[in-house]
Image (cartoon, rainbow, N blue to C red):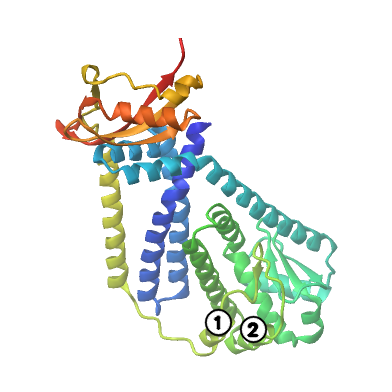
Amino acid sequence: MTNLIHGAGWTLIHFLWQGAVIGVLAAALLAMMRDARPGTRYAVACAAMLACLLWPAYEFTSALQTTPRSLQALALAGAGGGFAHSDLLTGIDARLPLLVSAWLACVGALALRSACGLAWIARARRHGGRNAHWQQRLSQLAARLGIRRAVSLRIVETLASPITAGWWRPVVLMPAALVARMPPELLEALLAHELAHVRRHDFLLNLLQNVVETLLFYHPAVWWLSRRIRQERELVADSIAAGLTGEPRKLALALSELEKMQFATQRLALAADGGDLTQRIRHLVLPQQQRGHVKAVLACLGLAAACLAGYANARVDAKVPVARTPAIVDFSTCSKPEWPKQDLKAEHTGTVTLSFRVSESGAVTGSRVVQSSGHPGLDTAARRGIEKCSFKPATVRGKAVSTWQQMKYVWTLE
């Protein structure tokens, strides 16, 4: 259990910089691909999101198979002689159970929220109204798109935008207000958009996206990538719908009507008004000429490969055993600590744990109380006693280095 907590805790901490690296690379690549096709940008954003899932998974698996990363960091800090660094890592390591517990609590809350959303969709599917005319029209559009699975249509009173859910048995939930008020040709364009999601199996990808959001909720790069994926996904579906109906302006008019409506976003389903509606309308009405960005793609892929290669080499170097020896005390130089008179008179006893720094010369140059005996006088006497000792300094690759070590003083009365 301890290894699981340490592995999970340090995996979450290391994803802070890993997610930043993935986010920066994805942002640079998408910026250079701003004139590329939405489908290409969508693939890049999805690949970056998948990397956000696989990299921590690899880190966690590696942590369970090797020495915990926290212990490796503490050993390196001790060899380098930096007390502040060692003390910081010790503090982080001690708080990993609290960190992992808080993360699990947040993941549980987000998972419950997602489960409630799926339950709401299932209920809307069972109790939603039916419309024979629009069901037939939906089936005709699905056949034209090459969708072989039956797609159901349900009319929902409490909904303001069409949404699509389900993979094996897909369903389109249509707001009752749109069926009653929107012109048929505009409503048909919205149905074509929803069917584009069905044909591309976007619901499954959206569920995976929600899993990553739930597990890595604390990183801004994950939420930025998720928002970018939704924007590009809607642009791709718009292009398919416009090609199916042959009239992009009808879909643009339908989207402009949706922009005026307010609704509660259901992220577990695919809503017709997802993404940036203004950008989507502009993309339909004034499509830009798509230009290739092969050089930009190759440059970013080369940068990503260089980063991954450097990270791989760093991990290989970390696994190479380093010849090191700990500091060894010379007991002939130590003298028994003097029992403080007041504590001796009061018959105070206890155990004090000290952390002390041994320099390259073997002298004790600093100490602190890790666990007190309960009596300040005994703690101070123990610190004075350890500072009188000399050590054979620790070595790394045969070179003397300073290091932090611990020792216990037991004060007992015989």
Instruction: Give x and y (percent) for residue 326.
Output: 25, 27
The correct choice, above or below, for 8 with respect to 47 in the image is above
Residue 180 shown left or right of residue 148 in the figure? right
Residue 78 against residue 107 in the figure, above or below = above
Q: Is the C-beta separation of discs 1 and 2 under 8 Å? A: yes
- Find residue 255 and name its label: 2
Q: Secondary structure at mark 1?
A: helix
- Name the residue: 54% across, 55% down: 212
Residue drawn at 74 percent across, 76 percent down? 137
Residue 230 position within the rendered picture, expressed as x and y whole percent measured from the top left: 55, 69
Residue 160: give its label. Answer: none
User: Quadrant of residue 82 in the image?
Assistant: top left
Residue at 72% x, 70% y: name it: 139
Q: Is residue 154 left or right of residue 98?
A: right
In the rendering, which numbered label is found on residue 280?
A: 1
Q: Secondary structure at mark 2?
A: helix
Which residue, as the protein is rendered here, is positioned at the far left? Answer: 398
Can you tell which quarter of the image residue 138 is in?
A: bottom right
Please tell me which residue is depicted at 64% across the width and 77% down the height of the picture. Answer: 273
What amino acid does circle 1 point to?
Arg
